[in-house]
């Protein structure tokens, strides 16, 4: 055990605690379950995408401008999250918090843009009960948006703990785990952008 502890002595702060390493491993397993969830939602959407029941189609609804804005905002938040982790590794708490708070502001902006998009669609007669396509669309994007919302609340709680307790192996581990979660949501969005929006615009 002493040899194992010595091996992790120079590891990043979040990996220096045995419980922290187990928690991070457990979170990777959790992300595996999340991949299965979103894979199921993507499969359901792709099956239903052509079933518009005479309602609005993808080409009727999707516009490149709003979608690109959402994509750039969310991908930028992934970049700022990475910088926050970089400052955490440098044990620069101030730099870490500045970049992490910026990440959350970008995440909130993304949610605002997505909600505005949904409201626009509803005003155009595109509701979740209108067709199979819209049912699959709103379920997939709504689930992703719900995950982003959860991430914002979760990350806010982590910030409060870091402000209260400082940067310790425990708070560093929590920060690292929420960063993994945030990057995962960005990867899911890349698939949404490609398989839902781009494919829908050219279909």
Image (cartoon, grey):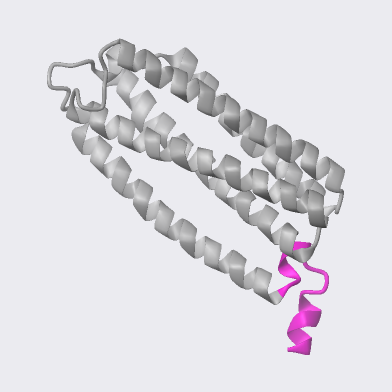
Q: Position of residue 122 (x, y in %)?
A: 31, 16
Q: Position of residue 179 (x, y in %)?
A: 63, 49
Quarter of the image for residue 145 reads top left
Q: Position of residue 146 (x, y in %)?
A: 45, 39
| Nearest the eye: 3 or 126 | 126
| Nearest the eye: 184 or 122 | 122
Residue drawn 26% across and 34% down?
A: 136
| Nearest the eye: 189 or 98 | 98
In the rendered image, the vertical position of residue 86 relative to residue 198, given as above or below: below
Q: Decide if residue 12 is in sight here.
A: no
Residue drawn 54% across and 62% down?
A: 27
The answer to whether residue 190 is left or right of residue 82 is left
Quarter of the image for residue 84 reads top right
Residue drawn 66% across and 48% down?
A: 157
7 is within the stretch colored magenta:
yes
Q: Decide if residue 145 is in sight here.
A: yes
In the rendered image, the vertical position of residue 146 relative to residue 61, given as above or below: below
Give the residues in magenta: 1-17
In the rendered image, the vertical position of residue 39 relative to residue 45, given as above or below: below
């Amino acid at each position: 055990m002493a040899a194992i502890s010595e091996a992790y002595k120079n590891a990043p702060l979040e990996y220096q605690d045995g419980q922290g390493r187990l928690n991070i491993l457990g979170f990777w397993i959790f992300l595996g379950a999340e991949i299965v969830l979103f894979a199921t939602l993507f499969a359901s959407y792709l099956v239903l995408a052509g079933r518009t029941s005479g309602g609005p189609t993808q080409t009727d609804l999707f516009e490149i401008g709003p979608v690109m804005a959402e994509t750039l905002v969310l991908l930028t938040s992934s970049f700022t999250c990475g910088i926050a982790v970089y400052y955490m590794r440098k044990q620069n708490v101030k730099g870490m918090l500045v970049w992490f708070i910026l990440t959350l502001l970008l995440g909130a902006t993304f949610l605002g843009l997505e909600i505005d998009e949904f409201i626009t669609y509803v005003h155009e007669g595109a509701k979740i009960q209108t067709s199979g396509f819209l049912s699959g669309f709103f379920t997939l994007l709504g689930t992703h948006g719900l995950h982003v919302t959860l991430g914002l609340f979760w990350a806010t709680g982590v910030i409060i703990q870091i402000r209260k307790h400082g940067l310790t192996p425990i708070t560093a581990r929590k920060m690292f785990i929420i960063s993994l979660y945030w990057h995962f949501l960005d990867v899911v969005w890349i698939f949404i952008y490609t398989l839902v929006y781009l494919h829908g615009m050219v279909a």
